[in-house]
Image (tube, rainbow, N blue to C red):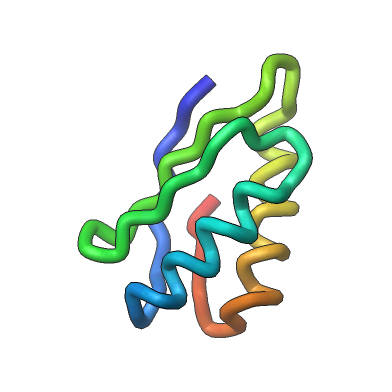
């Protein structure tokens, strides 16, 4: 399943770090962050609970960029 989430991030480098952090979360098949559109595209693993996984993604992103926001 693929979903798009709105995000807030201040710079392109921060967006790259968020993308890398999101891609390491269990349940994520792939993640891409677009700084220009302020969106995160996520593809979930088969059987993953998107709500629970995205809470983990938001927490992982906060660890690498404390002022970012992932709108769930």
Q: Is residue 19 left or right of residue 50?
A: left
- Dividing the picture into quadrants, the one containing residue 16 is bottom left
Residue 2 against residue 65 in the figure, above or below: above
Residue 37 against residue 26 in the figure, above or below: below
Write the residue at 42% across / 41% down.
41
Write the residue at 49% across / 57% down.
71
**Front-lying residue, 51 or 38:** 38
Q: State the image coordinates of residue 59 (x, y, percent, origin top left).
A: 71, 64
Total tally of numbered discs in the picture: 0
Name of the residue lying farthest toward the left: 36
Q: Is residue 1 left or right of residue 27?
A: left
Q: State the image coordinates of residue 4 (x, y, percent, origin top left).
A: 40, 39
Q: State the image coordinates of residue 44 (x, y, percent, origin top left).
A: 61, 28
Q: State the image coordinates of residue 28 (x, y, percent, origin top left).
A: 65, 36
Residue 19 against residue 44 in the figure, above or below: below
Residue 31 against residue 44 in the figure, above or below: below
Name of the residue lying farthest toward the top: 46
Write the residue at 54% across / 36% down.
30
Write the residue at 61% across / 53% down.
22
């Amino acid at each position: 399943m693929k979903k798009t989430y709105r995000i807030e991030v201040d710079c392109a480098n921060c967006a790259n770090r968020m993308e890398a952090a999101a891609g390491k979360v269990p349940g994520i098949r792939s993640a891409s962050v677009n700084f220009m559109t302020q969106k995160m595209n996520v593809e979930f693993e088969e059987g993953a609970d998107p709500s629970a996984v995205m809470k983990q993604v938001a927490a992982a992103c906060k660890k690498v960029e404390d002022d970012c926001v992932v709108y769930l």
